[in-house]
């Protein structure tokens, strides 16, 4: 078992690899993987599917549900990896305070690679043309208590980087 925090939150815009890296990371450390997309209310999913970006008013109840779930899981003693865009600093701070042992890791991926990845997606409710709005909404976590890793590296290398930093 690794010395990774009880709760690891992987952040980044759509296409950054949060779910893919999260799955590999959760498998490696014996954690439950939660995908924040599963917590969106149907109205948010429909709005994105219609090509309309979410507002902070749309995101706030969604973040509330994630904070509640992380707190519940921490009380139960579950080790968790959460894949969540958390584009805004205020949302990341709320997730960070959701449980006693939370670490935030941002997957940094360039716009060209993001566009390539999103173009190859066929079964996701968020269309690729919302990428620009996500990049515009992203308040980059540099300077926060947040680790930034290269999300363009192979998945196992990204997981290794996350665990290396988590154990420092």
Image (spheres, rainbow, N blue to C red):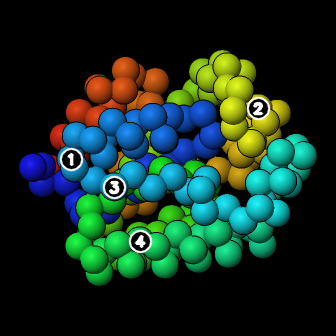
Q: Is residue 111 left or right of residue 31?
A: right
Task: Quickly name the residue at label 4.
Answer: 70
- Mark 3 nearby-residue class (10 Å; few <14, some 14–19, many ≥20): some
Tell which circle, 4 or 1, labels the residue nearer the N-terminal end: 1
User: How far across and down, in percent of the image, does residue 63 sit?
Assistant: 59, 70
| Dot 4: element | helix
Q: CA distance from mark 2 to mark 3?
A: 28 Å
- Residue drawn at x 33%, y 31% is 158
Q: Is residue 104 left or right of residue 14?
A: left
- Where 115 falls versus 132 (above or below)? above
| Dot 3: element | strand
Q: Nearer the viewer, residue 104 or 7?
A: 7
Q: Residue furthest left?
A: 1
Tell which circle, 3 or 4, labels the residue nearer the N-terminal end: 3
User: How far across and down, in percent of the image, does residue 62 sit?
Assistant: 64, 69
Task: Quickly name the residue at label 1.
Answer: 29
Q: Which mark is residue 90?
A: none
- Residue drawn at x 26%, y 61% is 79
Q: CA distance from mark 2 to mark 4?
A: 29 Å
Tell which circle, 2 or 1, labels the residue nearer the N-terminal end: 1
- Mark 4 nearby-residue class (10 Å; few <14, some 14–19, many ≥20): many
Circles 2 and 4 in contact, beta carbons < 8 Å: no
Task: Quickly name the residue at label 2.
Answer: 128
Viewer-nearest of labels 3 and 4?
A: 3
Tell which circle, 2 or 4, labels the residue nearer the N-terminal end: 4
Q: Which mark is residue 32?
A: 3
- Residue drawn at x 27%, y 41% is 27
Residue 78, quarter of picture: bottom left
User: How far across and down, in percent of the image, does residue 159 sit?
Assistant: 29, 35
């Amino acid at each position: 078992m690794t010395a990774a925090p009880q709760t690891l939150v992987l952040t980044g815009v759509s296409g950054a690899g949060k779910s893919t890296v999260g799955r590999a990371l959760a498998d490696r450390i014996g954690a439950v993987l939660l995908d924040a997309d599963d917590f969106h209310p149907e109205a948010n999913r429909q709005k994105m599917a219609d090509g309309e970006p979410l507002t902070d008013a749309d995101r706030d109840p969604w973040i509330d549900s994630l904070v509640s779930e992380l707190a519940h899981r921490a009380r139960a003693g579950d080790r968790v990896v959460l894949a969540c865009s958390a584009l805004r600093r205020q949302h990341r701070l709320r997730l960070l305070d959701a449980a006693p042992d939370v670490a935030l890791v941002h997957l940094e991926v360039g716009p060209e690679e993001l566009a390539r990845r999103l173009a190859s997606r066929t079964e996701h409710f968020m269309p690729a043309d919302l990428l620009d709005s996500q990049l515009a909404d992203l308040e980059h976590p540099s300077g926060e208590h947040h680790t930034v890793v290269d999300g363009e590296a192979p998945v196992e290398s990204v997981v290794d980087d996350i665990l290396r930093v988590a154990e420092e």
